[in-house]
Structures are given as C-alpha cells and as structure tokens.
C-alpha cells in the first residue's frame, strides 16, 4: 500500500442498475444533527492528551484568558468530533438514513460485499473558533458516488459527503468534505502478492554477548568497559583490547551519535526485512562505533555526520533490537530552542508557557518568513496506544482502529490510524512551528499508505505561498507524512499568523 488510494486503476464494470441505484442518492441531504453534548474542556483535554497537543489556548485557562479569544478554545481539528455518534448509537457508517444521506449508500454497498472502509480524503474549512459551551450541529449532503474502481487495497466505490457545522445561533463554524472508499476485502493488489512475511531472525549471541542483548530487551544500550583502564569497546570481547585486562563491565550509553557511514542493502533480499535496508555505522557520543539499522528517513536524505538517536524495535513481543533514527539537524535544533518543536516542548510547565509562546511569536518575524521556508522535520512513532487513544479521543469507535481481527477481516494487516488523528497530528506539528495564536483557515488531507503500529511517520513541509496585509500574514503550507510503506498523508494548510507589532 505504497500509493495514494485516490490513484485508482481503470474502472471495473458492474451491473448498471446497481450503479444507477447508488448514483440516484447523490444530492440527498439529511436532517440537522445536533451534538449530544456541548463543547467542554474535559473533552478538549482528552483530545489534547491523546494528540500530545500542548497549545496553552486549548488547555491553560490563565494563558487563554489573556489571549484575543478571552478563554479556552477548541482545536480546529476537533471540528468533526463534536457531532460524532456514541459507541452504542452507531457510527457514521451505521446511522439512520434520515440523519445521514450516506447511510443508505453504505448499507447498499455492505449488502453488495463492499464491507471494508477506509477514509481517503478530508477537506476542512474553519470559519469561527469553537469554545466551551457551544452546541454544534451538522447537516450532511451526499456529493458523489464513484463508479466501481480497482485500488491498491481493493475494488470498491468512493463516497463523498459534505457536512456544514453550525453553532446554536445558526452561524456556520466550519465545513468538511469527506471521502471514503468502501471496498471488497481480499480484492486488493497486496492480496495477490506473496505470503505473510516470516519473523525477523533473532541475533546470534553467546556467553560474551548475552548481557548486551539482555540490556536491549530492557531498552538499554550498553557499552563494554574495562574496570582497570576505563577503555570502552564494541563489539564486546573477552579481554580489554587496550590493556588486556579481563575485568570487564559495562556502562549505559546516551543513545546519541553521528552517522559515520552507511550501506544500502538491495540484494540478496531476506523476506523478514523491508527494502531498501539501511545499515549504518554509528559513532556514539562515548567514542565507540556500532553497526545498526537506520530508520525513519528516506535513503536520499542520508548524510555523513547527521545526528542520530537510538530507536527501539520490538520484534513480535519476543525480543528488542536497537536501531537508530535521525534527530533534528543542528539548524532545526537552534530553531527549536525558541519554537519548542522537539519533544521537550511537551515537558514545559504551565508557568513557563506564556514566555515560550512569546518566544515563538518573535521567532516567526514577518521579515524572516519566505516562500520555500521548511518546517522542522518531525518523527512520529506509530504505536498501538497512539492509534487507539486518538480514535477514542476523536469519538471514532470503528473497530478497525482498535481490533486487529476486525481490521484483518476488512482487508487490513492490522489496526490503523483514523483520518481525524492524521489531521490532529499535522495540525499540532504546524502549530508547534507557527505558534499557539495561529488562526486556522483550512486543511486539505489526502491519505495513502495506512499508519500501522510499529511504524514511524516522518512529517515534512514548506511554505508555498504567503500574503502580507500590514502585520497580518497568511501562509499556505504543503506537507507530507511518510511511513515505511510510502506516503501516508499529503496535503495543504492555510493559516493566519498572529499580528506582530513593529517593535518586536
């Protein structure tokens, strides 16, 4: 699944009467659906916790009260969350046809064997900030049902809807154009390929190296050390290679280092590994070098001397291996000192948050922003916890996001991230760069290869357009999120930076 699901093959023929029945539903609208509950701070906090979102305007009353919004606001990426159905009330794919005009189409497709479902596109427009106490409603319209298509994951139909969201006064707060693929499980091109990947082989060990691999299973990277001369050495030996002593112990390494060299394995291919396989020689901060796989980066982006950090690979819950992933470049590190885009941002105390946001605003000076500016690269580990917790936080109870067997029955190898989470993570990343008081206008996402547990998504992007109106700057940002299977998400976002006074 290494391509955008919207990139389909030729249309696949099917009975005209069935297609006409589907098409006859286009243009139908459902009744206005009012959220069961008002927007609330606890729900916002739960969403922020799951997304690792620390924007103080969402969670810190003291900071939010001093902002232009005069209080807590909901993350724009939560627009769809407020009208999502409860666990026992049915999902967007199970609602009464009066409420959701797409429900009848989904039912018809289910009955015809198109039981698999995956979101492929979402376009959100934000017209007004949403605050605690608002009561959100949504009205859905069916925009389109495609003819039968052959895609990478299965033969199916694309179904496109538009939902208009309003507050209790009837004022529009946003809109969403949403596209899903309803497909027949087992008809995808991946299913035509080879059998299940064999398990990864366990590294060979002996009495001299058992301690090293045991430490890895505890997520400790240890280096052999001499108790007599303090020499550090790797790989482990039976004697100190410096003084010859057999009094050996070990120290815990920092897990940080530089890429000294690398090779890319293409052939012969071992079925248990993904290719191209990057094998790197990593020079640790402690001065020794070790061979390890390099992950979380495209081969064309490798550079001698690039900073790396250890990244643990849990192999089928049987053993843990060390591998290394890129840290931020020195340029990105200097930038993150002020905009807090690295993970340490999430450790900032509430008392320091106001100063932090001031630094962010000053960093993005109007005169410094240029078309082509790159956002700091962000590595997002994809874990089961992330997929499940964010699905719950977005009130998406589809079983494919938490039940591996259900996901497999619908044509997927494992549970996968929902599109609301993809939108939330991208929004968080852009917010980290642009600052907490950024106003969101829109975000357009197109999904490709799913995010499954055990993978890493690499986010990158750049400024593609900008417009200045006094001290107000509007930016267009193009972004991509890649995993080991290919492109997970690609799209664009439009934001308004906070006004910055000339003396700043």
Image: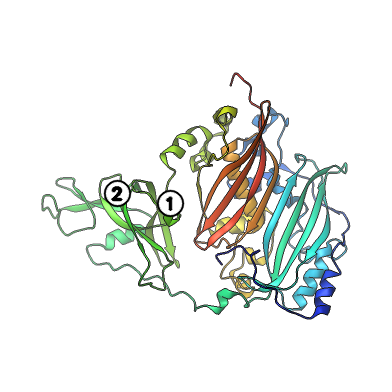
Q: Residue furthest top?
A: 503
Residue 368, quarter of the rendered image: top right
Residue 351, quarter of the rendered image: top right
Colour scheme: rainbow
**Residue at left offset 34%, top offset 48%:** 304
Left/right placement of residue 489 relative to residue 336 reads right
Q: Are marks 2 and 1 in contact (CB under 8 Å)?
A: no
Image location of residue 393, percent across then percent down:
66, 53
Image location of residue 224, percent across then percent down:
23, 53
Q: Examine the rendered structure and indicate whether residue 326 appears above or below residue 359.
A: below
Please indicate, yes or no, whether residue 293 appears anywhere in the rendered image: yes
Q: Examine the rendered structure and indicate whether residue 211 appears above or below residue 491.
A: below
Q: Residue furthest left?
A: 244
**Residue at left offset 53%, top offset 56%:** 482
Residue designated by label 2 = 283
Image location of residue 231, percent across then percent down:
18, 47
Residue designated by label 1 = 301
Q: Quadrant of the C terminus?
A: top right
- Front residue of 377/218: it is 377
Left/right placement of residue 150 relative to residue 241 reads right
Q: Residues within 10 Å of mark 2 (few under 14, many from 20)?
A: many
Residue 191, quarter of the rendered image: bottom right
- Front residue of 145/393: it is 145
Q: Quadrant of the N terminus?
A: bottom right
């Amino acid at each position: 699944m290494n391509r955008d699901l919207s990139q389909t093959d030729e249309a696949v023929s099917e009975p005209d009467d069935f297609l006409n029945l589907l098409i006859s539903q286009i243009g139908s609208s459902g009744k206005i659906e009012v959220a069961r509950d008002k927007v609330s701070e606890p729900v916002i906090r739960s969403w922020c916790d799951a997304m690792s979102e620390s924007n103080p305007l969402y969670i810190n009353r003291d900071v939010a009260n001093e902002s232009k919004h005069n209080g807590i606001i909901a993350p724009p990426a939560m627009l769809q969350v407020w009208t999502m159905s409860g666990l026992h009330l049915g999902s967007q794919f199970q609602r009464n046809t009066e409420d959701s005009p797409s429900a009848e189409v989904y039912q018809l497709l289910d009955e015809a064997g198109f039981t698999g479902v995956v979101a492929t596109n979402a376009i959100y427009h934000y017209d007004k900030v949403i605050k605690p106490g608002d009561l959100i409603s949504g009205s859905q319209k069916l925009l389109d049902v495609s003819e039968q298509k052959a895609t990478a994951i299965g033969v199916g139909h694309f179904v496109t809807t538009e939902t208009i969201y309003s507050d209790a006064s009837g004022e529009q707060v946003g809109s969403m154009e949403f596209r899903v693929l309803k497909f027949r499980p087992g008809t995808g091109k991946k299913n035509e390929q080879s059998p299940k990947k064999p398990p990864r082989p366990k590294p060979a060990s002996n009495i001299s190296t058992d301690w090293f691999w045991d430490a890895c299973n505890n997520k400790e990277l240890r280096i052999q050390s001499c108790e007599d001369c303090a020499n550090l050495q790797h790989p482990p030996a039976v004697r100190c290679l410096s003084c010859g002593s057999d009094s050996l112990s070990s120290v815990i390494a920092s897990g940080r280092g530089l890429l000294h060299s690398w090779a890319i394995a293409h052939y012969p291919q071992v079925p248990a590994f993904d290719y191209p396989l990057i094998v790197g020689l990593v020079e640790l901060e402690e001065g020794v070098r070790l061979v390890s796989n390099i992950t979380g980066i495209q081969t064309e982006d490798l550079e001698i001397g690039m900073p790396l950090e250890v990244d643990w690979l849990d192999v089928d819950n049987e053993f843990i291996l060390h591998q290394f992933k890129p840290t931020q470049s020195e340029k990105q590190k200097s930038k993150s000192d002020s905009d807090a885009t690295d993970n340490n941002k999430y450790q900032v105390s509430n008392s320091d948050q106001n100063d932090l946001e001031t630094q962010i605003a000053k960093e993005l000076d109007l005169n410094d922003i240029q078309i082509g500016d790159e956002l700091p690269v962000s590595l997002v580990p994809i874990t089961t916890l992330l997929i499940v917790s964010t699905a719950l936080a977005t009130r998406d109870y589809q079983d494919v996001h938490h039940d591996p067997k259900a996901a497999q029955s619908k044509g997927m190898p494992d549970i996968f991230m929902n599109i609301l989470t993809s939108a939330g993570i991208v929004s968080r990343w852009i917010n980290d760069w642009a600052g907490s008081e950024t106003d969101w206008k829109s975000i357009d996402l197109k999904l490709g290869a799913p995010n499954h547990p055990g993978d890493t998504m690499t986010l990158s992007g750049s400024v593609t357009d900008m417009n200045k109106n006094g001290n107000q700057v509007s930016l267009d940002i193009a972004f991509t999120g890649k995993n080991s299977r290919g492109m997970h998400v690609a799209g664009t976002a439009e934001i308004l930076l906070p006004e910055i006074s000339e003396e700043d």
